[in-house]
Every structure is written in structure tokens, then in C-alpha cells.
Image (cartoon, helix red, strand yellow):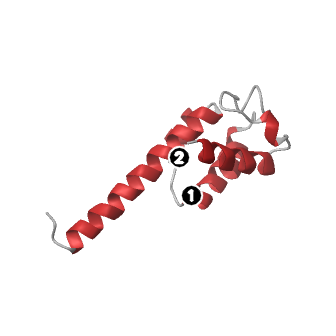
Amino acid sequence: MENLLEEVKVLVAEIIPVAKKAVCLNSNFESDLGVADRIAFSVGIIAAIEEKFGISISEALASEIETVDDLLIVVECLKRIKEIERQKEVMIKWKCF
């Protein structure tokens, strides 16, 4: 998860005008990083995360993300789900069920 944190820190720092060192696990996007506009958050950070990691974050889920840690948990869970789905497809293809 440490590597994922670094990737997210770089991405967030590129999208919003903050130094990478200002982005930490407990950083709140609104109060600590100055992202008060939820639409800008979804269009900027969420869209970039989705593109980078090949995942899709629903609007409902995105609206619950308040901190960098929340974002990391969502990304990690969705990446795991994506991997499980990929493995399931392989198992179906090879009739492992």
C-alpha cells in the first residue's frame, strides 16, 4: 500500500496546486488540501485515479471519500475486485468451476 500511497500523492499533487509532501494519509481533501468543490474533485482527482488504475468509482462512492486514506482504501478494494473478476474469467475459460 506504500507504493500506492506514493502514486496517489504524485497524482493528487499534479492535479491540485499542493506540494507532494503536503499530501499524506490523513489529509482531508477539503480542509487540508483545499478541494472544496466536489464536482472538481470528481472530474479531476477521481477521473485521474480511474484512468491510472483502470477502475471505475461510482458517484455515490466518490461522494463518501473525504481523505487520502479513504481514497486509498477505495482504490485498493476496486483493484482487488478487478483482479478477482479477471481470475474468475480465466477460471471459466479453463472450466475450473
Decide which of 17, 43 is in the foreground and name it: 17
Q: Is residue 67 left or right of residue 59?
A: right
Residue located beneath label 2 in the image: 75
Q: Are marks 1 and 2 in contact (CB under 8 Å)?
A: yes
Residue extending farthest to the front is 2
Between the C-alphas of marks 1 and 2, the distance is 8 Å
Residue located beneath label 1 in the image: 53
Asked if residue 65 can be seen in this view, the reply is: no
Placement of 43 over or under 87, stated as above or below: above
Decide which of 45, 24 is in the foreground and name it: 24
Query: Looking at the picture, how far across and down is residue 96, in whole percent?
Result: 16, 66
Residue type at mark 1 is Phe
**N-terminal label among 1 and 2:** 1
Decide which of 34, 8 is in the foreground and name it: 8
Q: For numbered disc 2, what is the local secondary structure? A: helix
Query: Looking at the picture, how far across and down is residue 80, in whole percent?
Result: 41, 50
Instruction: Name the mark on residue 79.
Output: none
Residue under the image location 51 percent in, 56 percent down: 55
Residue type at mark 2 is Val
